[in-house]
Amino acid sequence: MSEYRPDKKRVAQSFSAAAEHYDDVAVLQRQTADELLERLSYITIEPQTIVDLGAGTGRNLSLLQKRYPHAQLVAVDIAPQMLKQAEKRYRHDQGIKRWLPKQPRLQVLAGDAEAIPLADNSVDLIYANLALQWCDPKRCFSEIFRVLKPQGLLMFTSLGPDTLTELRQAWAEVDSYPHVNLFYDMHDVGDAMTASGLADCVLDMEPYTLSYNDAMSVMRDLKILGARNVNEGRRRGLTGKQLMQKVISSYETFRQADGLPASYEVIFGHAWKLAQSGQCRADDDSVYIPISEIKRL
């Protein structure tokens, strides 16, 4: 697995700054969240404790509460301002129901998926929509395994390396700095899941494409989302107008009939914490086997 270490302090700052207007442009996040919830509907589980890991502004909290009305919900996010928005939204969505007796309360915790602020074996279901791509897979899946109860379930989406390939290529025509965030591919994710001890892991990829009028709109939406460049080797300082115009011109070569595409490689996955470690497989039935389990002949 190649090493990619995003600047976590910058991640937290960027998403906190974006919290107020995040939902205005979170089109992809809504689409993948709904698909992930749809996939969850095919799995039989009655969780007592659910963690929305990387909860963001909390859109999915009430949806999870509606599906599992007796479950205790925990919202975890690295950005404190996101959690404030999540708490406010949840109170609004629940309305008068939150004052009813025996109504589960929302617990809000600031924390990183690489250091989840919860006890061992304490969670039945972890739901993580487009959050784990900001983490080191080995660390976050090890943490997820730690906090899940036996028979606990992880449902998640993440982003693969072909995400925003048009913008990446446009910048590559201008300089050699990484201007678009790097992400791990599905095989690296599968290896990390297996190594953590998670079992019966299933992974597949779905392409999503958003269309824009111009390249500046793509970059503007990414800024509003808080998805800023967090690569450690990123270029420092402001980008000049002449350089930006070159990027815009390069991006224009990707124009299609419905506008400029912004492509996303979305990885969907789920896995269980079982007594015995298992294998991870992709949708093409390939099996990921930890190197430690391969015996020498």
Image (cartoon, rainbow, N blue to C red):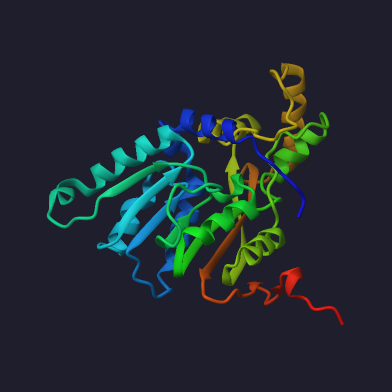
Q: Nearer the viewer, residue 241 or 204?
A: 204
User: Toward which corner of the image does residue 37 lie, by quadrant?
Assistant: bottom left
The answer to whether any part of residue 39 appears in the image is no
Q: Nearer the viewer, residue 47 or 160?
A: 47
Question: Is 174 located above or below residue 105 in the figure?
Answer: above
Q: Residue 200, position in %: x, y? A: 57, 74
Question: Is 246 located above or below residue 126 in the figure?
Answer: above
- Residue visible at 68% across and 48% down? 183
- Residue visible at 69% across and 18% down? 238
Q: For the view shown, which residue lies furthest in the right direction?
A: 297
- Residue visible at 83% across and 32% down? 176
* Image quarter (top left, top right, bottom left or bottom right) of the N terminus: bottom right
* Image quarter (top left, top right, bottom left or bottom right) of the C terminus: bottom right
Q: Residue 167, position in %: x, y? A: 70, 38
Q: Residue 12, position in %: x, y? A: 52, 34
**Horizontal relation, residue 106 to residue 165: left or right:** left
Q: Residue 132, position in %: x, y? A: 57, 50
Question: How many discs mark residues in the rendered view?
Answer: 0
